[in-house]
Amino acid sequence: MTTNYHRIASAIDYIRANFQLQPNLDEIAEHIHLSPFHFQRLFSEWAGTSPKKFLQYISLAHAKTLLKEKASLLDTAMHIGLSGSSRLHDLFMTIEGMTPGEYKNGGENLTIRYSFAQTPFGEVLVASTDKGICHMAFHTDEKLAFNELQNKFPKARYQHLFDPLQHNALLIFSRDWKKLDEIKLHLKGSDFQLKVWESLLKIPMGQLASYSDIAQHIAKPKAARAVGTAVGDNPVAFLIPCHRVIQATGALGGYHWGMTRKTAMIGWEMAQMEQPG
């Protein structure tokens, strides 16, 4: 799965770098050293759609259209016409903030279990406390990824152990969510950060919102910059869908785990929403 993602990522990088030239299927396939037939098959298996359709999903024009059509989408998460699958994060995710007693003194009162797993967007480190998932991050080096987690809770007790909380959370990367139970997140954050992160859960899969949209939604219309900082501090990649937040111009903006990965996620999710059933 990771090898396939690296090839997809290389293709997306090439497309983004040569976007004005509008490279065709043969040129993209040649760049990643595959025949056009094998590239088409690889891409369709990964995304559930064709490279051509994927290109439309990640275009600036499409992003602008989504932002324009969204209107009050965040304020009407239960809007008729929004399917259960599009509201996956909202329906299946709950956030509990860590108490000061839980994270004080570098997390000395916490026991954190962690493991590594493959996803459609590369390898992740996923970590959990007794109460829920506390960290999920994409990485290319397991040791560095663990060091990043340790830096957040330097005095916690760590167990390299794959537990049911992690297993359930990783099911979100599946295309079949029937087995998915509620995912509990146990997060260290300020009241403002937690409010921003909870608002991100309201952005339906296959949709996008701007930083100013989020600021409006949490009744802090002048706090778009602070919202951007809180979005960037999201401790659980993909589970809290910060990749769905873009600039008001339609440009994708930044992403803690890389712009190529953000582009891949946005296109992949839009493809899932096009799937029958």
Image (cartoon, rainbow, N blue to C red):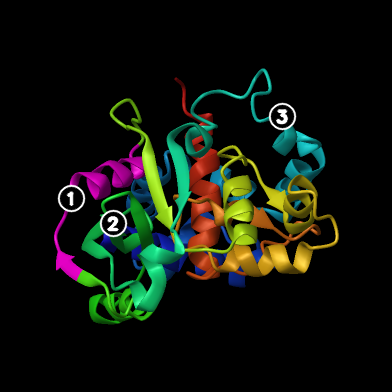
Sequence-first disc among 1 and 2: 2
What is the C-alpha distance between the residues marked 1 and 2? Answer: 8 Å
- State how many labels appear: 3
Label 1–label 2 contact, CB within 8 A: yes
Q: What amino acid does circle 2 point to?
A: Ser
Q: Secondary structure at mark 2?
A: strand
Decide whether residue 166 is among the magenta residues.
yes
* Camera-side mark, 3 or 2: 2
Q: Is residue 180 left or right of residue 262?
A: left
| Residues packed near mark 2 inside 10 Å, few (<14), some (14 to 19) or many (20 plus) | many
For label 3, the residue is 76
Disc sitting over residue 163 in the figure: 1
**Tags 1 and 3 in contact by the CB under 8 Å rule?**
no
- Left or right: 142 in relation to 63: left
> Which quadrant would the C terminus be assigned to in this image?
top left
Quadrant assignment, res 147: bottom left
Residue 178 picture location, percent across and down: 32, 25
Residue range highlighted in magenta: 158-174
Spatial CA span between label 1 and label 3: 35 Å
Q: Amino acid at mark 1?
A: Asp
Residue 154: x and y, percent?
31, 80
**Which sits in the foreground, 22 or 268?**
268
Which residue lies at the image location 67% right of the left edge and 53% below the top edge?
Answer: 59
